[in-house]
Image (cartoon, coloured by chain):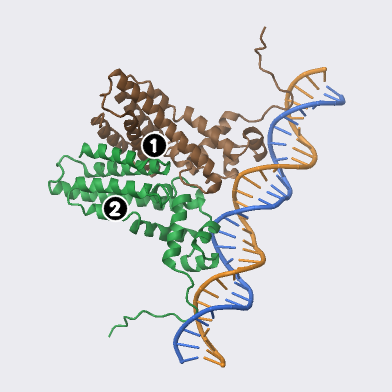
Chain colours: A brown, B green, C orange, D blue
Amino acid sequence: MMETEQRRPTGRPRGFDVDEALERALRVFWEQGYEGASLATLTGAMGISTTSMYSTFGNKEELFRKALDRYSEGPSAYLHRALDEPTALGVASAILAGTILTTTRPDNPHGCLGVQGALATSDSGRQVRDLLAAWRDDTCTLVRERFARAVDDGDLPPEVDPGLLARLVTTVAYGIAVQAASGVDQEELRAIADAILRQWPLL
Amino acid sequence: MMETEQRRPTGRPRGFDVDEALERALRVFWEQGYEGASLATLTGAMGISTTSMYSTFGNKEELFRKALDRYSEGPSAYLHRALDEPTALGVASAILAGTILTTTRPDNPHGCLGVQGALATSDSGRQVRDLLAAWRDDTCTLVRERFARAVDDGDLPPEVDPGLLARLVTTVAYGIAVQAASGVDQEELRAIADAILRQWPLL
DNA sequence: TCAGTTCAGCATCGATCGATGCGGAAAAGG
DNA sequence: CCTTTTCCGCATCGATCGATGCTGAACTGA
């Protein structure tokens, strides 16, 4: 028989919830960026000591990576749901709608962690900057592959370049994220997305 | 007769070129952001001592404000030239073309200072963050007023909302700036801009 | 030449950065 | 109970943060 029951570690159990602490850290990174978020601010928001943070998450960069993963599966989960839409227009519409909702939700920091987390950094933040650039590019790649499938299915005209269309949709999404970070109204952003989608597929 | 000759100050003259030092500082802020750019990095690139920097520019925040002014009149000067285009389509086309050129020029940092200079900051950078948000909003306002004039002139259909169209163009421009910061190819961005402009006026 | 003024190199300020070591407290197994 | 293991508050590390004072050098006008 397999040993299915997870090994209960001996010793004093952890005194805080890892998921909740990570959620708190995510929000700090989201609002203040990777370099702007200090360890003191992070641990203060997480409600734990620096010792607990380092023993649990490694270091600041590892904490950010885990926070980004949580962001992808939480606030940014609309992206993968959007890719399941039956039509390419539905995909694009869901991406822009999800972007607007996530970047302007009143109880969240405004903007997108993947954009404002580390867009320009010093040398010490270069690794995280590259990580987010890859994160954005991965998003674009996923959309491109979905659009390529739409072309194969006849859902998009054969002359449409899926890569270009994916780059266009993500560009608008990132632009929306910048506007949202400045506090632009949600309905105004919705009107922009509608105007773009009204010309679908634009190419 | 007016005293037209400028007062020559007595004492030892300044040993460096203020414009060139500011240009160097601008490039550091452009690449590393306001909070990422340390005084040591700034003065090192400017080739002056911290004493000279403080006596000449005030402090780090004032230095950034002056660098932003220089950015507006230099790399971002295409914006005001674009507003002088005879048609609204010409304005939008010039804005997007200028954005692409400035944010992807090989000898410049990639991206837009107004976007990546301080998109998410700690509390200490909040003033600069707000400054850049206002800078972006001012840009949008200038474009809106230009489009409103185009509506009055019959250059744009009367049902077009100038504010919405201006927000759309600037949103695409900011999105392009984000993509450029990630290293996206210039021609790909041009293709995106062309696709947008092909549907003009989109609303 | 001299007095007056400014520049800028050097040292350093207190605060904060990310990160770590120590040691008592707490909770498990035996 | 006792031993073992882990957690975590506290103090602190060297480095760096933005910012300033001191002081001799440099250059002016008289």
- Return the chain for callout 1: A
Closer to us: mark 2 or mark 1? 2
In the picture provided, is A144 more to the left or to the right than A59? left
| Residue ID for mark 2 | B79
- Return the chain for callout 2: B
For numbered disc 2, what is the local secondary structure? helix
Visible residue check, residue A104: yes
For numbered disc 1, what is the local secondary structure? helix
Q: Quadrant of the C terminus of chain A?
A: top left
| Residue ID for mark 1 | A104
Q: Residue at x 47, y 68 (%)?
A: B56
Residue type at mark 1: give it.
Thr
Residue B31 location in percent, x, y?
46, 50
State the image quarter where residue B201 is shown: top left
Q: CA distance from mark 2 to mark 1?
A: 27 Å
Q: Residue at x 32, y 41 (%)?
A: B187
- Mark 1 surroundings within 10 Å by alpha-carbon count, few (fewer than 14), some (14 through 19), many (20 or more): many
